[in-house]
Image: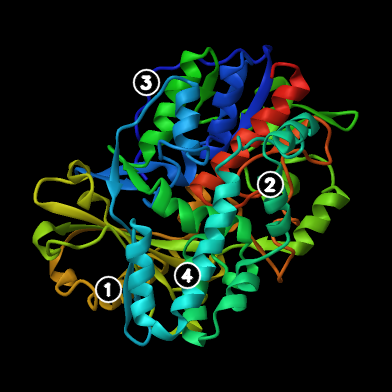
Amino acid sequence: MTETVQPAQQTPHPTTEYDAIIIGSGIGGLVTATQLAAKGAKVLVLERYLIPGGSAGYFEREGYRFDVGASMIFGFGTEGTTNLLTRALDAVDMQIDTIPDSCQIHYHLPQNLDLKVHRDYEQFIQELSQKFPHEKTGIRKFYDECWTVFNCLNSMELLSLEEPRYLLRVFFEHPLSCLGLVKYLPLNVGDIARRYIQDPELLKFIDMECYCWSVVPAEKTPMINAGMVFSDRHYGGINYPRGGVGQIAQKLVEGLERYGSAIQYKARVKEIITEKGKAVGVRLANGTEYRAKRVISNATHWDTFDKLLPTATPKKEQRWEQRYEKSPSFLSLHLGVKADLLPVGTECHHILLEDWEKMEDPEGTIFVSIPTLLDPNLAPEGHHIIHTFTPSWMSDWQGLSSQAYQDKKNAAAQRLITRLEGVFPGLQEAVVYQEVGTARTHRRFLGREDGTYGPIPQRKLWGLLGMPFNRTSVPGLYCVGDSTFPGQGLNAVAFSGFACAHRVAVDLGVS
């Protein structure tokens, strides 16, 4: 990641007490911050790095602007209530120009299962049904049931499920939608898919449909989350922010400051200060202390409770850690390639897997984003960005000398390029720039335990019922982001931000 120079900023005064301090400027934290600032709260965001966004950030090299994470972005629609990124920006008078993508994913899967998830719902259903004509009825019923979930979500304002007045209001306004969602809360995708589908290969495809964003197969993926993703890609669609994914965080910060709150960079929180068991502020690595009426952590659950709290992890949080484990990190390969490598009609997002049994293995599934097919200005003229990433564990990258670490990165990059040659013939010769990131890279720059991208169930759980909300067992301390309801994904952490801000605002009396 680049040492991006930030404009001069006013350092907050350590003795000032804020309404809320937010640890980390990932999208969940920034949505919480901007929602609170828009309500008149005084907010301070503390970011350990030089730019905001976390895994939705960016870095620049030799004329390329690379997204740190995936470029498949939900939440930028214009209708309904699930367009959470659009709504978050609107709250602080910000907008981003977006570029619609006509296809969510081009799959390259075992047994020559090659198909595209088109933005047009009927086109996708027809293409999938042509691959599995004997399951045509089941395919329709399964994905239509996903629409049932989505329509329930899309009919109501998505705020904190911990706030009784909101729940009462939304139930009276949308009783059928609420009852519908209650029905699906304990269910996982696998429960629903097996009602309608018997073909083992098609069920494996449904596993991949879940794995590509939840990092677990269908039996462990909550149906509520799938209803959102599997339908919103056809409703609001995939829309790429012009200028790169990093623009989302940049605009949220601009809006935050416009509304009188602040962000401080190079501010690594060392400890959450507690007094009489209540969270009252934070202490930075340089010794500076800030006080607030509420403290909100956008760090992972493990970083928050096992590292930042000065006391032992509360029993409630220990029970959470018995149900969930860290998802893998990713091995990321950022490539600059000659533009003539990609023929006309190449899609922006691809997933490659040659063996179903290796879907969850390290370097098993390969994810590909080519954002310059949507926004050519992210690369020098005549070139494209190919961002490839695949699951990888921290344990594979520890205990290495500098040279051994570099050699292992280069070998891993070569393995990925060799496999991708099957999708993009001539890739090796077209590469003009290459950079590799590992779990160690993600831990260093994102401040996430083992470089993880969030929690995943250790075993099959009851849908979303096991996911914690924003309040914690420590008074005054809240969590936001992928360690809270409803889990991983950019739109999901935006949801958690709306919910957290709503709960905190009610508690502060500024709602």
Between the C-alphas of marks 1 and 4, the distance is 32 Å
Question: Of discs 3 and 2, which sits in the foreground?
Answer: 2
Which SS class for mark 2?
A: helix
How far apart are the alpha carbons under marks 3 and 2? 50 Å
Classify 219 as above or below 250.
below
Labels 1 & 3 near each other (Cβ < 8 A)? no
- Which numbered dot is residue 140? 4
User: Who comes first in sequence, dot 1 or dot 4?
Assistant: 4
Disc 1 versus disc 4: nearer the observer: 4
Q: Which residue sits at x=39%, y=68%?
A: 125
* Mark found first going from the N terminus, 2 or 4: 4
Which residue is disc 2 drawn over? 176
Front-lying residue, 190 or 334: 190
Q: Nearer the viewer, mark 2 or mark 1?
A: 2
The residue that disc 1 covers is 420
Q: Secondary structure at mark 1?
A: helix
Question: Which residue shows up at 62% across the image and 43% down it?
Answer: 299
Type of amino acid at the residue the image marks with label 2: Leu
The amino acid type of the residue labelled 4 equals: Arg
Task: Name the residue that disc number 3 marks.
Answer: 7
What's the residue at 57%, 56% (across, down)? Answer: 148
Measured in 3D between alpha carbons, the distance from the residue under mark 2 to the one under mark 4, in whole angstroms, is: 23 Å
